[in-house]
Image (spheres, coloured by chain):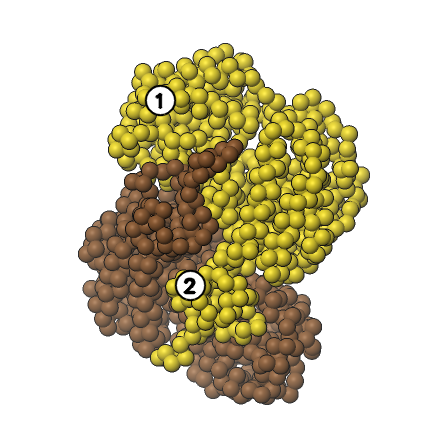
Chain colours: A brown, B yellow
Amino acid sequence: MIQSENFIGFSKSSESDIKITSFNAKTHEALPTYFFTATENELNRAVSKAKSAFPVFSNLAMNKRGDFLEQIAIEIEAIGDRLIEQAVLESGLPEARFIGERGRTTGQLRLFAKVLRDGNWVEASIDTPKPDRSPLPKPDIRQVLTAIGPIAIFTASNFPLAFSTAGGDTASAFAAGCPVIIKAHESHLGVNALVSSAIVRAAKKTAMPDGVFSSLNGSGYETGSQLVMHSEIKGVAFTGSFNGGKTLYDIAQKRKEPIPVFAEMGSINPVIFLPSKLENEGDQLATMYAGSITMGVGQFCTNPGLLIALKSEGLEKFKTVLSDKLSALPMHTMLNRGIETNFQKLRSEMLKQIGVNTFSSKDKLIPTLAFVSGADFIKNPNLHKEVFGPYSLLVECNDKEEIMDVVNTLEGQLTGTVMADTSDFEEYSELFPLLQNKVGRLIYNSTPTGVEVCYSMHHGGPFPATTDARFTSVGANAIKRFVRPICFQNAPQQLLPDSLKDANPLDIFRLVDGILSKKEI
Amino acid sequence: MIQSENFIGFSKSSESDIKITSFNAKTHEALPTYFFTATENELNRAVSKAKSAFPVFSNLAMNKRGDFLEQIAIEIEAIGDRLIEQAVLESGLPEARFIGERGRTTGQLRLFAKVLRDGNWVEASIDTPKPDRSPLPKPDIRQVLTAIGPIAIFTASNFPLAFSTAGGDTASAFAAGCPVIIKAHESHLGVNALVSSAIVRAAKKTAMPDGVFSSLNGSGYETGSQLVMHSEIKGVAFTGSFNGGKTLYDIAQKRKEPIPVFAEMGSINPVIFLPSKLENEGDQLATMYAGSITMGVGQFCTNPGLLIALKSEGLEKFKTVLSDKLSALPMHTMLNRGIETNFQKLRSEMLKQIGVNTFSSKDKLIPTLAFVSGADFIKNPNLHKEVFGPYSLLVECNDKEEIMDVVNTLEGQLTGTVMADTSDFEEYSELFPLLQNKVGRLIYNSTPTGVEVCYSMHHGGPFPATTDARFTSVGANAIKRFVRPICFQNAPQQLLPDSLKDANPLDIFRLVDGILSKKEI
């Protein structure tokens, strides 16, 4: 049973006369379940409950929040096939993908539970006092990370599970100690309701405070901007388009109290094929990249939308093989009608730009490889835009300097990839620091698609890839988005959090007078 | 000899016809040395040099940047009395203060050199590959912090050395690997020129690239906004007024590529005197706070501008003693005519607000203690504004609930202080988490003035105390403002920074598969 009402903490609410549905991605027909959009009153109640839950939730022992995260994973698994079926219906993506994505989602929840039980992430630091210091005694100063408050999360169309209701943003915000209010994605309202129910069940079973989680249906702009403008919302996470993310960012910066917005807005993810590698392994590279460009119907923020290489015989061969492989692949259903329309429109605009060519008919909607000269690419900013879908542009350069110039003109990117062998590494040594400056993740001899969930992952990058290059939305460090340092001076032991108590009851690493150790004070 | 020209990297430049001077703080007379304001052309050259210096400077071995910082400290000390005399002349503050402040400044430079030699601050993290993992192999993923680019720094009027040209912002930006462009403060152009010369000498002696440092004279608004809008500036640090900081923040957010602005904009720094403590130690507290309110003529961002207490006999006594002590203290010269005029104006506006009273004559310009009821304070946002100077407002509350209400209405603060004894801690246990939520540093039984430079210090706080509560402008963590993570996937050893190489040549702590250790891979 899918809940039609909004989730206002542990309560259901359906005050609005406006009801919406999501759509069958393949047929574009409305699905039978209706969802009530959230009224401003309901939104205010959700935020008010989150505000009340915050001091309780953020001060819970970390392992209690760990229990909550693990219970969410269990509840999601308990939904069983019903969740997978709904995701397939609303997204058009295949069942196998969602079995994988569900594993990624529950894996993320369990990773953050592990991070909490480990406890080192709080960056505890203690400077011991020196009462005899002259001319002034040195006080006792301690610092640790603390949660910032209720967070508004905008879920992603392209990952209905892993970047949505119980995705990485929610898992990391909960881990940090922040209540979450979800703005449900219109494309997968059913999946959202199923997962929201799982979170509420988990919250009740693990005795979390009412208000730790709410989920609102509504339009991205109206409900979304109401949420971001609410004075009790203290941070925002978003995954989606540049326009969507930048709009929320601008709203948040115009508030009386500006708040952080972590918008992951996508990228063209340049891949540089260096000459020796291309010459020796062109066919394998073409196969690898045909797969990467079409993975998830090209609907990944790390999709390789820009290929860069030196003109050569090897490149001619690679181009033909890659183009043929792409043409031979079927075009699958895209996530929703808006995304499909937008893909067709942007792709056809791109193919009309000066100097842009393809081997196949320009009108056929297929996975597309286009190509253009380095000179034409450099002077045309339109070609630097993301085409969300199975499309990639190959930039053919005359010499090494032109490759450097192309990289120099790029905007900030989530990823940059270099396909190279040993001789390329020597020949192109200036390229790597240049590319590093433009990206959040620098990949060697692999594809940008496939974002590993681990401790060292950074899924972020200089603007316009994200609104804040200092933070990641994937991996253990995602928790850092929802905290700030708090410093205590001469605090009595009983008023310090466990992480800072003399006896180190959490047995964590702490910086003691600048030296990392687990020792007691 | 004080340089009149702008410092454009290692070159002097004086293209403008407009010349400015700083003023004798005591007499308000123009000082004899003229300074050329920076033209837009000069500003562009400074940024262009910084851009060229960036890849070299940011990729230097950390101990080389450490040498640079230590050499700056040596060069500053080598200026000798000339620097102290100039600072006294331009600020009106006493010599002893500048001998102390110079020590703080060179101490900060040496602290960051130590942080660099230690190396742990880069937060290296390595996830080792699992080629046999099913269904997909796990790649090799590594992450470390990397510098963001040229930084514009706006220096503070109230700390001509420690928060200025070679102050904490500059020291931490250099430590991170970022070139610095200073917008010199109009109040201490002479001190700026002396310290800028010291930095340039140190840069040449330690073979830093030309462009690692520039210093521009000019108006805060015109030169300042040109700098912040320049597309090659990647971050901004500022210490000063709310209006100044918020203006720079707004400019930076409206750029095509928004950039981080770390503006430390001051605070009223509430101090809560709890009843038992006040009853037992009223006289000592009055002495302590008379000193804190007037320290540096009240011109500290941590000046205790708001005192909160429960009405009682003890409070009446404390109020009288504190007021008498303040009245007995002489009023010293303020930093410049603008600050003095503003202090007089704001102080007299405050004293006209409903319910505000003092013991002494309202027109006398002295260190001032005003008082007001909790109810009047809560309903009047004007009373929540900072009066920069020796002024403090005592809020007299009827009961515990009113104290909680007063704290609840406060905006974000750099610090919050609680003066309490054991019985107060028990009685007021709900107060501490509430106050913690409003501040960057929570102090017990001490004064907010005196910001220790150490590893655990956090000198920042929720808006409007700063524009970014997640970062500090004092202490070792100040370096974190000028870096972002960079992630490497499957990178060959020779293309990794030393911090991430298998052999751990820097011998630093790294998170290896989630566990902190110094082990080799």
**For the residue labelled by badge 2, is the local secondary structure a helix, a strand or a loop?**
strand
The foreground one among B5 and A325 is: B5
The foreground one among A316 and B310 is: B310
Point out the image quarter for the N terminus of chain A.
bottom left
The reply, left or right, for residue A3 in relation to residue A155 is: left
**For the residue labelled by badge 1, is the local secondary structure a helix, a strand or a loop?**
helix
The label shown at residue B281 is: 1
The reply, left or right, for residue A519 in relation to residue B449 is: left
Q: Residue at x 35, y 79 (%)?
A: B134
| Residue B195 point in image, percent of width and height | 68, 41
Q: Is residue A308 in view from this perspective?
A: yes
Packing grade of label 1 (10 A; few <14, some 14-19, many >=20) is: some
Q: Chain of mark 1?
A: B
Are tags 1 and 2 found on a single chain?
A: yes
The type of residue carrying mark 2 is Ser
The type of residue carrying mark 1 is Glu
N-term mark: 1 or 2: 1
Q: Is residue A415 in view from this perspective?
A: no
The foreground one among A366 and A385 is: A385
Q: Residue at x 35, y 34 (%)?
A: B408
The label shown at residue B515 is: none
User: Residues at badges 1 and 2 in contact (C-beta under 8 Å)?
Assistant: no
Q: Chain of mark 2?
A: B
Q: Which residue is mark 2?
A: B517
